[in-house]
């Protein structure tokens, strides 16, 4: 029987991955692991852990686990590691793949809205301002949010991740570089502000995109028909993480374990 393990079971994403994997019809044996658990040989492992933990676990599990799906950003931009959203780029997973990265939740919201347009328009630029929920920062941030006097209480905080030497935040740079990798559009320009808002769950993005062709639907710009404006909202813990993880597991089960 195929074995699938969830590592980081007690976190926000881990709990949601558990609920998602329980919906899969194809039979497999499900195992879960917390902070101090020894991970045995597995067919598929879903790592629901922060960057430093994933950075240690991936090489440590290399000889024991056939496929690893990592939710953290540690390996997302590593050449040779596919960054996968099954509706968009399932072909990035090949028989040689061992590690698959699942994208940033906010980037997922953007690219899921770009993908249906790609057969009709050549999109050259995207701008978004995000309204990101507290749960996107994991269980510690949720606990902080519920503590009286939290910075996030009735507030909008335009700093997610860390400030990089170029003045942009790490979260904003994910919007640029992960979009290019997932969409396989190395030249798209992505401009963004990422903002944490006092909402417990579900991210939103106000998006403006520009194409080479004029748009004839959605909310077209009043002066330039090659620009449209729209609003995206989605569950960051589901399509932005756990549901995407489940879809990758389903894809692997279908492709390699039938
Ligand atoms: N939250 C989102 O919307 C979202 C979306 C996309 C991607 N992600 C990414 O997904 C990952 C998990 O995020 P999260 O929000 O679930 O964070 P979280 O709530 O802080 O959960 C992280 C979990 O990792 C566990 N852990 C730490 N060291 C471990 C180890 N050595 N072995 C096994 N488990 C270990 C922690 O255990 P303890 O419970 O013992 O502390 C905790 O339960 C992060 O890399 C995050 O960036 C999150």
Image (spheres, grey):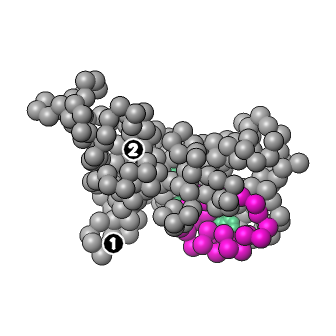
Q: Residues within 10 Å of mark 1 (few under 14, many from 20)?
A: few
Considering depth in this image, is 164 or 217 the residue closer to the camera? 217
Q: Quadrant of ligand 1?
A: bottom right
Q: Which residue is mark 2?
A: 110
Q: In the picture shown, does residue 257 fall above or below 70?
A: above
Q: Which residues are drawn in magenta?
A: 47-74
Q: Residue at x 51, y 62 (%)?
A: 76
Q: Secondary structure at mark 2?
A: helix
| Res. 186 in view | yes
Does residue 58 sit above or below 70 in this rendering?
A: below
195 in magenta: no
Badge 2 vs badge 1, beta-carbon distance below 8 Å: no
Residue extending furthest toward the top: 217
Spatial CA span between label 2 and label 1: 22 Å
Which residue is outermost to the left? 223
The image position of residue 149, as x and y in percent, is 39, 60
* Residue at figure coordinates x 26%, y 70% from the top left: 167
Q: Is residue 141 left or right of residue 7?
A: left
Say left or right for 229 vs 63.
left
Give the residue number, with chain letter if any, for mark 1.
Answer: 164
Kindly state the secondary structure of the residue where label 1 is placed: loop
Residue at image location 21% in from the left, 36% down from the top: 227
Choose between 167 and 35: the one closer to the eye.
167
Image quarter in which the C terminus is found: top right
Indicate the quadrant where residue 218 lies.
Answer: top left
Nearer to us: label 2 or label 1: 2
């Amino acid at each position: 029987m195929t074995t699938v393990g969830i590592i980081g079971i007690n976190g926000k994403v881990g709990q949601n991955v558990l609920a998602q994997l329980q919906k899969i019809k194809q039979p497999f044996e499900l195992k879960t692991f917390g902070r101090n658990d020894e991970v045995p040989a597995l067919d598929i492992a879903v790592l629901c852990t922060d960057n430093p933990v994933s950075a240690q676990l991936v090489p440590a599990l290399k000889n024991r686990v056939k496929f690893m799906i990592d939710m953290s950003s540690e390996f997302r931009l590593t050449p040779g590691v596919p960054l996968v959203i099954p509706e968009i780029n399932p072909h990035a997973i090949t028989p040689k793949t061992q590690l698959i990265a699942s994208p940033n939740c906010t980037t997922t919201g953007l690219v899921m809205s770009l993908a249906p347009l790609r057969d009709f328009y050549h999109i050259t630029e995207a701008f978004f301002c995000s309204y990101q929920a507290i749960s996107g920062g994991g269980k510690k941030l949720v606990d902080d949010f519920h503590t009286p006097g939290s910075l996030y209480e009735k507030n909008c905080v335009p700093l997610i991740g860390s400030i990089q030497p170029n003045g942009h935040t790490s979260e904003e740079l994910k919007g640029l570089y992960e979009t290019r990798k997932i969409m396989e559009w190395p030249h798209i320009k992505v401009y963004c502000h990422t903002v944490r808002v006092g909402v417990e769950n579900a991210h939103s993005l106000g998006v403006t995109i520009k194409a080479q062709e004029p748009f004839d639907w959605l909310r077209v710009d009043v002066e330039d028909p090659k620009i449209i404006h729209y609003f995206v909202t989605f569950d960051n813990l589901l399509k932005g993480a756990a549901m995407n993880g489940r879809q990758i597991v389903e894809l692997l089960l279908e492709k390699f374990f039938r």
